[in-house]
Amino acid sequence: MTDLTLWYDRPATDWETQALPIGNGALGAMVFGGTGTERLQFNEKSLWTGGPGSREGYDFGDWTSPRPGAIAGVQEALDRDGSMAPEAVAAALGQPKSGFGAYQPFGDLWLDLATRPGSAAGYRRELSLGEAAARVTYTADGVRHTREYLASHPANVIAGRVSADEPGQVSFTLRVSTPHEDGRVGVSAGRLTIRGRLADNGMTFEAQVRVVTEGGSRTDGVDRITVTGADSAVFVLSAGTDYAPVHPHYRGQDPHAAVTDAVDRAVAQGYEALRRAHQADHRTLFDRVRLDLGRREPSIPTDRLRAAYAGGASADDRALETLFFAYGRYLLIASSRAGSLPANLQGVWNDSTTPPWSGDYHVNINLQMNYWLADQTNLAETAQPYVDYVAGLVRPGEITAREMFGARGWLVHNETNPFGFTGVHDWATSFWFPEAGAWLAQQLYDRYRFSSDTGYLRDTAYPVMKGAAEFWLDTLRTDPRDGTLVVSPSYSPEHGDFSAGASMSQQIVRDLFTNVAEAADVLGDAEFGGRVRDALAKLDPGLRIGSWGQLQEWKADRDDPENAHRHVSHLFALHPGRQIAAGSREGEAARVSLTARGDGGTGWSKAWKINFWARLLDGDHAHRMLSEQLRTSTLDNLWDTHPPFQIDGNFGACAGMAEMLVQSQHGEIHVLPALPSAWPTGSVRGLRARGDVTVDIDWRDGAAERITLHAGRTGPITVRTTLAGGCRVSGGVRPRRSGDTLSWDAQAGTAYTVSRVSP
Ligand code: FUC
């Protein structure tokens, strides 16, 4: 089975650019596929330094001593002078990070193989996205060797099977290493255990590996297990820590019992049953969406496919784009499943004790981007860790709101960790971003817009959204320039000076208030809905058009048309917000700003620009950004690179490709809103639209031929499509037509097919 498979004709030597990722949300591994020594570098997502108990002392980023009047002082200076240098604001409001910590690698699992050096031929290393399995095969001295690895979510293990096409040919020594000085290894009865406590914060970690053989013999060493002359062998690994997502201590049970249980159950189940259950679980999610851009199976390995990619008309270019789309969904399934932390800057994969940006949760774009694809590409379940995590920020965020701002509600600033870090640090251009909480809450509401699940809205999303709104109701300030309500101090992420009322700040708060008001209507919270609407009426919407026709980044017109900064924050209202529609005055201004920023940027920046251009209904420019990302910000293993590797770009690009095919942010389902000329003919199955609708599309020569809408609930549906003029709709409905739109009242559980009527 080679469909949707990354494959290579040699082993990986480099972790970041070549090794292949498998994962089950909590556990992840990078497979190298060596022939002399095999390496699986592995992770467990809660293994973090920092937090409570950290040697440096942990303060949640909250001010260690009160600073009465500090924020007011900055606000007054901004009212007086209009702007302030980030360094000056950081000196007044920042504080050095203490005990923030970093995501840690767990260890490496090694298989020292008996293959004679230089003897391997016919080598293939692959990652099947459909099966969620990594494989290595080669022939040595006339024997075909095969290894397969998978990371099972239902069993919570990483498992591998080592086999050969002749009996008695499987021999290797399995050992484990860890970068953590107090990790101790022990072996007994075919079970290798590694256990310790992180020196920084005392977090307990444990991993176990059990080895089971068919034929041959197994020998336990002091710190390794040797298999000799077996027909095949299976290993099963599980790992855990005593982390718990509970404020304020963030510690729970010792991992020993759960790890032992997972490993023993998996061994008892047997590899075939484990594999079947894993694939059933994976396919339930992965198979919901299928994209066909007219691809053919490429005959060259994936690294060469990527190197040859030109963003042109070749079948290989379409194949790479299709693979990249599927890979985004695969990576989310592999790095974000219920019961664990959300995908961090590297998903779940990390080989460094000092990863870039601590491998943390950056919340001025990155964590949000990780989840843009979840609902759109029919993977709603994978966002559960995000929902739980954001809800878990409320408690510490309330303390930060009270102590720092004297406000009700909650907030989080620019970056956070698994230990409720909701306060500040002192890096001048990124320490201050109290809007992050509102932005995180936006996605909780959007999840409701996709699912129409009122129970979820009431019990989960609304309390978080309301708390975020309470914070802003208490802290917005009347702008002496024009009497509107503004955020102050306000900072457009990582760019320019501090001021009052930067566009992104205003747009995020407006989006939050709009969502809270809508939700309050649904849930009957009239009093709070009314308060929010009053504030909304006075709020500066952050949508000013400036002297060169641009959407202003700040309230004062100071945009530099030559500036190509990677953050394009002032276009929040275009995407992921919904306050700007293509074709409006603001939409045109957004286009001017985006054009000026250019097609460059880091990996995630390019991914965001795919989404922006798709929302501006410019499919060719969206595709040009996808091409830029594939040509210049994608590694041989198809990981996005900032540089270095950062997974947000994989997720953001996948979401952007979905935005090119279906949009639904403005109350109607827009089919093929931004189809590029490079994709003249194709089909997609299973994309989701807001209002609980699943969408299938076939298109030919750049136009839709057939659209099927699967209604999940009873209620009105409006579809915008070029088919509207000459089509028939199945399902016994007579749609109302208006220009390019068709509307009807849908019944839950019914599929409606819109198809072209030949003239
Ligand atoms: C934001 C970006 C950087 C980087 C970091 C992890 O701060 O501005 O480019 O992606 O997050």
Image: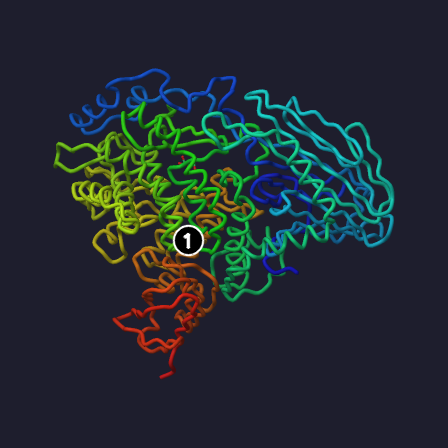
Q: Quadrant of the C terminus?
A: bottom left
Q: Would you say 272 lies left or right of 472 here?
A: right
The quarter holding residue 748 reads: bottom left
Residue 592 shows up from this direction: no
Badge 1 element: helix
Front residue of 617/94: it is: 94
Neighbor class of circle 1 (other Cα within 10 Å; few <14, some 14-19, many 20+) is many
Q: Is 368 in front, or is 39?
A: 368
Position of the N terminus by quadrant: bottom right
The percent position of residue 564, horizontal first and vertical second, equals: 34, 41
Image position of 729 (left or right of 235): left
> As displayed, is residue 227 above or below residue 3?
above
Which corner quadrant of the image does residue 177 belong to?
top right
The residue most toward the bottom is: 759
678 relative position to 276: left or right: left
Residue type beneath disc 1 = Gly
- Outermost residue, front side: 524
Residue 236 in picture, x, y percent from top left: 71, 42
Q: Residue at x 65, y 25 (%)?
A: 196
Q: Position of residue 218 (x, y in %)?
A: 84, 39
**Which residue is under mark 1?**
656
Can I make out residue 315 in this image? yes
Instruction: Residue 556 in the image: state x and y as whole percent.
Output: 19, 37
> Residue shown at 28%/73% (left/top)?
736
